[in-house]
Each structure stands twice: as C-alpha cells, then as structure tokens.
C-alpha cells in the first residue's frame, strides 16, 4: 500500500469518526438537559483513580531513582526533570479534566 492510499484511508477514517461522534450530539442535547452527567461522573471517577494510583507510583519512582543515582554516583538532571514534570502533569491533569468537563455541562 503506497503512501497516498494510506493518507486517503486515514483521512476517510477521520471523517467517518467525526460524523459518528457529531451526529447524535444535537439529538441527545435536545432530549435531556442532563445528558452529560454520566460522562462527567465517569471522568471524575477515572481522574480520581488515576491520581490515586499515579502519585504513589511516581513517588516510588523518584525515591528509587534517588537510591540508584546515589549508588552509581551519577545524577542525570534531565531524567530528574522528567520525573518532576510527570508529577506536575499528574497534579494538573485532574483539575484540567474537571474544568474541561464543566465546559460541556453548562
């Protein structure tokens, strides 16, 4: 399969996905004013669970990296910054997801 056919296939799938996603939206929004509530509750539950799981794993990773860098006497600041950026994303992700879901609820 050459490149132009792959591009055409991906573009076709993107258009099809957009139509499938956008088509039931107005009908659902008109039929009930509380249509976003199940998705919002599911997203809140998911973000709570991911933060609850992700934060201790990241903490253990940073502690493990500290032990490893002490044993090998080699501290890679780029890796440490990536750990800290991951922690920041875990911390910011939940409020951002809640805010984003709030935009659709109002």
Image (cartoon, rainbow, N blue to C red):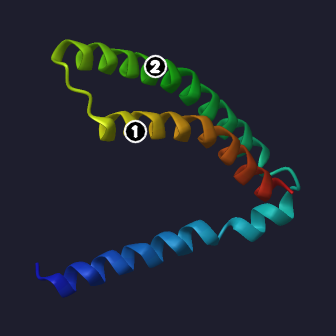
Establish if 12 lies above or below 62. below
Q: Is residue 60 left or right of residue 44?
A: left
**Quadrant in the picture for residue 103:** bottom right
Image x and y of residue 89, in percent = 53, 41
Distance between the alpha carbons at the discs numbered 1 and 2:
14 Å
Image x and y of residue 53, in percent = 51, 22
Front residue (pair 78, 94): 78
Establish if 20 lies above or below 103. below
Image x and y of residue 96, in percent = 67, 47
Q: Residue at x 38, y 15 (%)?
A: 63
Q: Is residue 22 left or right of residue 86?
A: right
Q: Is residue 52 left or right of residue 68?
A: right
Q: From this viewpoint, which residue is outermost toward the bottom?
A: 4
Q: Residue at x 61, y 34 (%)?
A: 47
Badge 1 or badge 2: first in the primary sequence: 2
**Quadrant in the picture for residue 83:** top left
Q: Is residue 59 left or right of residue 105?
A: left
Front residue (pair 37, 55): 55
Secondary structure, mark 1, is helix
Label 1: few (<14), some (14–19) or many (≥20) C-alpha neighbours in 10 Å: few
Residue 81 marker: 1
Establish if 63 lies above or below 17. above
Label 2: few (<14), some (14–19) or many (≥20) C-alpha neighbours in 10 Å: some
Establish if 5 lies above or below 43. below
The residue wearing badge 2 is: 59
Front residue (pair 89, 67): 67
Q: Residue at x 62, y 41 (%)?
A: 92
């Amino acid at each position: 399969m050459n490149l132009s056919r792959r591009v055409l296939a991906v573009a076709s799938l993107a258009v099809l996905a957009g139509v499938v996603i956008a088509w039931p939206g107005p009908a659902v929004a008109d039929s009930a004013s509380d249509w976003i509530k199940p998705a919002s509750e599911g997203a809140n539950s998911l973000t709570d669970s991911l933060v609850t799981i992700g934060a201790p794993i990241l903490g253990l990773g940073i502690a493990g990296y500290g032990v490893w860098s002490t044993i090998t006497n080699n501290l890679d600041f780029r890796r440490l910054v990536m750990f800290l950026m991951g922690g920041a994303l875990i911390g910011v992700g939940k409020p951002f997801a809640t805010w984003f879901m709030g935009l659709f609820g109002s």
